[in-house]
Image (cartoon, rainbow, N blue to C red):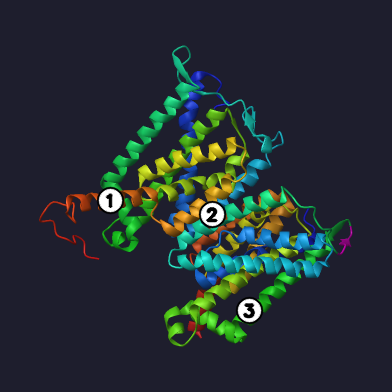
Amino acid sequence: MVNGINLFFQFLDSFGFIVLAAIGLAVIFGMMGVINLAHGELIMIGAYGTTLVANAGAPLVLAMAAGVLAAAVAGLIIERTIVKRLYHRPLDSMVATWALGLALTQVVRIIFGNSLSGIGLPFGAIRFGAFSYSMYRTVLSVVALALLVGAYLVFTRTEFGIRARATIQDADTARAMGVDTDRMYTSTFVIGCALAGLTGALYAPALSIVPGMGSTFLVEAFVAVVTGGTSVLLGTTLAAGVLGSADALFTNLYGTFIGQVAMLILAILILRFLPTGLSGALEDLRERIGGEN
Amino acid sequence: MSLNLGSTLGITVAIPVAVAVATVVAFVLGYFMFYGRVTGVFVAIITLVTTVVMQTFMAQTAGSEWAIGDVKLGGFNGMPGIPNVALGVEGVSISFRGMTFYWLVLVLLVVTYLGARALVNGRFGYAMVGVREDEDRIEMLGYDVRRVKLTVFTLGGAISGLSGVLYASWGNYIDPSVFTLTFATLPVIWVTVGGRESLLGAVLATVALEWFRQQLSITGSEFALVVVGLLLLFIVLVVPDGIVPYVHEKGLGAYRKYTGTDDDRPAGTPQEEIAE
């Protein structure tokens, strides 16, 4: 039985999860064309940072800030030492970041063991009728929305955003106009990693903290980025909306696994029929309507 | 697959059936990717996501409703009691285990290697290399890039299917851990380290790395994956073409220095046969 309110909360949850899982990856991919396969591990670093600091007795917000900082620092080191050398070899950068992720997971397992004791879920539950839904996870979907709006404002309204977009569109011209494109790449990568860390920090209370936890986010993150297409923020929003609906509906009807399969099948169909992704298709549509006027 | 077909003849039949299933799956996935003009990193992502979803699927098949014939898929517990590889009909048959299994695998490896070698050196091999080097140009020359890619992908699926058969009957057991990302991407490491444009490199690197990994696991070290990961990182950064082509190149250079010629081609060969 599909309950409308329950379905709505499920959708919010899926939407928030997909946006948060994908946004760090999407920013890096959209700006640099680099698929960061260590994305899951950065989320894991964020979660570990948060959990460790929180278990040491710090308030949750401070712990989350520590998690974000840890991921950002890790991102800075990764960019300076590895990704920087592989800008023109996207497939190699994928293999390299994946190798890094493999090593990171194992190092964390050696240092901290197979799991950390988690931190409790803040807030309570929302109750309606026979159902209840975690308040915290609902708050997360609001945070996801706020992040999208914030990222949109940063990329359209600030000096940094204009330079960043100039670098994506035409790196050579941007350089000629005095933009330090190397620095733009580095800061974009660090921002992407910090966003991944934030995702880890936000989900730290809601998940079990294990070294392989990053892979929980991989399917949603990659599917969203691939189906979103070239225009990163719009693409992620659309993909999260479309895939989140499919996920929520099928999860509600047939369980979590079928929800994931539905999402994957939908993604493959989208790629087969809309090769430029959801954002590309929307732009084509807008141009066609604009052309008729 | 072979659990349902208990007899020796059954096992003989099960092997091609298992390979065929892998081939068909690869074909369908490849069709959607390559005929959807999916390229580069997206191909990698889709195959990666498919692996994760397969793992999720196999891991939740613990219930008794998930069964093929009499055999339960077993979820995380996997499927025990997979028989050894056997060929022939009842009465006249060979069962492979221990040393004989080793020889079987070795023979299959040599046959597969030679087959792949013949393929790469043949007409289709030129088309494959052409697609790798420059898709647009090979398309202008009248080749269907999508079909070449799909063929190669499907062939790769068939070979993987064979290796899956051997792996399952080697341990007489299979569980969803074969669908984990680490397991699925180990071949990527072997091929990258050995040299992705070299068949010999892939074989040598696989043997060397797996031997190394076994040694580390025997000594109980947890650092196997760390070392393998860092090695891969090092290769990608320093020797992007892989070790075997690198050694080949260096060896050729030393040979030329030794013989005092800069060119190992016959005299009179134009210096630049193909203008870039």
The amino acid at mark 1 is Tyr
| Coordinates of residue B175 in the picture (x, y in percent) | 62, 36
Please give the label number shown on residue A152. Answer: 3
The amino acid at mark 3 is Tyr
Q: Chain of mark 3?
A: A
Whether residue A125 appears in magenta in the rendering, the answer is: yes
Q: Is residue A241 visible?
A: no
Give the Cα distance between marks 2 and 3: 32 Å
Give the Cα distance between marks 1 and 2: 31 Å
Query: In this orientation, which residue lies closer to the viewer: A291 or B265?
Result: B265
Question: Which span of residues is magenta-colored?
Answer: A123-129
In what element is the residue under mark 3? Answer: helix
The amino acid at mark 2 is Ala
Please give the label number shown on residue A99. Answer: 2
Assess whether mark 2 and mark 1 are in contact (beta carbons under 8 angstroms): no
Q: Are marks 2 and 3 on the same chain?
A: yes
| Coordinates of residue A156 in the picture (x, y in percent) | 60, 83
